[in-house]
Amino acid sequence: MSKILEKEFFSENVAKIDLYAPEIAKSRKPGHFVIIKIGDKGERVPLTIASSDNEKGTITLVVQKVGVTSAKLLKLEVGDEVTDVVGPLGKATHIEKVGTVLCAGGGVGVAPLMPIVEGFKKAGNRVITVLAARTKELVILEEQMRRYSDEVIIMTDDGTYGRQGLVTQGMEEVIKREKVDMSVIIGPAIMMKFGALTTKKYNIKTYVSLNTIMVDGTGMCGACRVSVGGKTRFVCVDGPEFDAHQVDFEQMMMRMGAYKDQEYAAYQKYLGTLETVA
Amino acid sequence: MENIIDYLKAERSQEWRNEIRKSMKTKERTSKVRASMPEADPDVRNKSNVEVNTGLDKDIAILEAQRCIDCPTPTCIDGCPVGIYIPKFIKKIEVGDFLAAASVLKETNGLPAVCGRVCPQEKQCEASCFYTLKLNKPPVAIGYLERFAADYERNSGKATVPEVAGSSKVKVAVVGSGPAGLAASGDLAKLGYDVTVFEALHEIGGVLKYGIPEFRLPNDIVDFEIENLRKMGVKFRNNFLVGKTASFEDLKADGFEAFFVGSGAGLPRFMNIPGENYNGIFSSNEYLTRVNLMNAAKPEFDTPVISGKNVAVIGGGNTAMDSVRTAKRLGAKRAMIIYRRSEEEMPARIEEVKHAKEEGIEFMNLHNPLEYYADETGRVKSAKIQKMKLGEPDASGRRRPIPIEGSEFVIDVDTVVVSVGVSPNPIVPASLPKLEITDWGTIVVDKDTMQSSTMPEIFAGGDIVRGGATVILAMGDGRKAAAGMHKYIQEKTKAN
Ligand SMILES: Cc1cc2nc3c(=O)[nH]c(=O)nc-3n(C[C@H](O)[C@H](O)[C@H](O)COP(=O)(O)OP(=O)(O)OC[C@H]3O[C@@H](n4cnc5c(N)ncnc54)[C@H](O)[C@@H]3O)c2cc1C
Ligand code: FES
């Protein structure tokens, strides 16, 4: 059981939640994630740890409403408990001084990117961050990113904020302008795929953080498997970060759609129960 | 060993044992027919989760207990990895003192209701029963009787909690709550230690909970045993991954003086054939976890599972049988085993294979998948299968399967469960660079004390030491390790 100590909405469907989990707060490093489960009948879902506060004993999760569990989590209030929280899981990001690091985040991928941006900055790198969103309201964590980035470029699909265009355009602009030594891209699968193609063109070492379907998160089931460099790897223990140019994104996107129908039906049912309660 | 033999002799010559032995002629005992286990109707049970074996009733249990001739040298005990005092508990059943029979079981086995259900007795105690060895008759149904006594005690409401030696302040940690960890924690609690069991999942029980299905081992039974351990003072921390949530160093700093690692063989293997990552293809661990641990087949639970119409399960072990029988229960029209050797080589228990057949499972033995094909959404739709034949025995002693060239054909499948074995869970070894492990990733320990060869405060047992093994071997390891840890801590305290 982990109590929610703070909750703040960034937009209608995205909120930051601080959970009391002192052991995890103490052990976690950038790149780690937790698995949560809400209620006895809940499913287990992975969420990246965006930041932590060792003194308060809290970890911060940034949650976007995409299905039953995220919707349930966003409905919980300060003082409520999340039934199960386990972590930190996965391998931590390998942070070192490499020179200039280009970080790109899209959608809720911005949340897991935050500790990585912070880590690379603190390790003495020049960090340029590209944040992408559909529209102005969906741009999150801008202020925090600015704190640890030498430059933040914002791209929106509809041009309501920053510049109009895709994340890859923002990235390419930087790559053409200056020498980039490494890149980290986190976001929806399709965005990571095209981001990876962009950096590949310029031969820049690139990492992505994968958000596959998971069950246990300890390497026990293989639900999270992806093909990397032609080999099957388990995202929860071998990842979540992999060499972007080796990941089979097509297969990953196909696998992420495995339960689309069931998930949609479950979500509709869940929304239905809310209506009957209201 | 000497003192055990003496103990057995002394027990056997007790007045009540002499009397009961003399109460019936050996001839009469050996002329009785072995009890058969009552079972739920195959056509009913393959559509529900009811337990398949329903257990012996009192009268039948007593009749079966009468078959045991109470041998002077009970060879059956040699076949039992934890050395249960088999004739003694059986004779307690014969005299009708079922609670006493259960106590005898619990002297050496903390989970008799579990073992009575899932142990491969046909390869252990019953294989070395006098009836099997000398009379060429079906052995005494030791497993059924074990289950009977344990169930009787549980249902009587008079189950006793083992005595705990005055509580000590010495803290010990158990990593993993499978049978190895549970057995170790029970013994450590009896010795008076302050025991905490750390478990990565949200449920306690390891494979007993997430792997073995309800129809073979109801969760209540496992929970009852866990509750007993709680009463003995054992603390359980779920959602705690040792090596991740906290390191061994952190726990040492917290005062834990010794560790038992029973982290299991949780890493599923795949065959690495084309198409194996299509949707609808699972490891047996994932398939069983979704259904058993996450209750995915029940609509009120959030976790989804794909319930296919044509389900192929690849493999011939217990895990494969559990998966294929689960698929049938989830509504599969065709639920089939695809196994590359013949039924004779199958590692699954004979009883499971028999039950599977009764439930309408198809067996494609001497077949092996080569490739999977999917529809446009990425969901598996068919498999290319090759026929096999048996050649010379390989390193495992089983005859090697050889592909028959040109025998390939394609079958329709919409769900595939890959059940071709597991590897040791790498999380603990990865977090302890000094720990000696084998090339297969198992932890190297002394076989008597179960102490790590390189880290004296670490003990290990069960599947993390043996690779995939059995519940009873895991429990035996846990018990040996508890004794080893006790000795280690005593010596350490003396030295200081
Ligand atoms: C489907 C199936 C059916 C089987 N049927 C039979 C049968 O009929 N008869 C039989 O005898 N055997 C059977 N077996 C084998 C038997 O279940 C295993 O040999 C036995 O469970 C091994 O016990 P264990 O305690 O070593 O590990 P496990 O039962 O695997 O338990 C290990 C536990 O440790 C936890 N863990 C791992 N790492 C950590 C960590 N770092 N920190 C905290 N916790 C951790 C895991 O989550 C898990 O709960 C079956 C196995 C399966 C999968
Ligand atoms: S989530 Fe089960 S192995 Fe990765």
Image (cartoon, coloured by chain):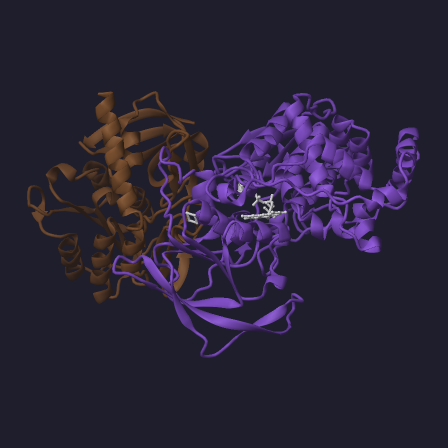
Chain colours: A brown, B purple
Q: Quadrant of residue A110?
A: top left
How far from the left and from the top, in percent, is residue A121?
29, 46
Relative to residue B125, is residue B312 drawn left or right? left
Query: Looking at the image, how many numbered discs can be counted on the residues?
Result: 0
Residue extending farthest to the bottom is: B406
* In this picture, residue B180 sits left or right of residue B66: left
Q: Is residue A75 above or below residue B483?
A: above
Q: Residue at x 36, y 48 (%)?
A: B306
Whether residue A48 is visible to the viewer of this picture, yes or no, is yes
Q: Is residue A212 above or below residue A273?
A: below
Q: Which sits in the foreground, A103 or A40?
A: A40
Q: Residue at x 10, y 51 (%)?
A: A165
Is residue B411 placed above or below B482 in the rendered structure?
Answer: below
The foreground one among A28 and A101 is A28
User: Which residue occupies 77% across, 43% down?
Assistant: B83
How far across and how far down the image is residue A166, in percent? 13, 52
Question: Can residue A219 be seen from the camera position used here?
Answer: no
Q: Position of residue B16 (x, y in %)?
A: 89, 29
Comparing A203 with A82, the one in front is A82
Q: Position of residue A195 (x, y in %)?
A: 21, 57
Q: Relative to B389, is B184 above or below? A: above
For ligand 1, which image quadrant applies?
A: top right
Residue B143 found in image quarter:
top right
The quarter of the rendered structure image containing the C terminus of chain A is: top left
- Left/right of residue A271 with respect to residue B283 in the rendered view: left
Q: Quadrant of the N terminus of chain A?
A: top left
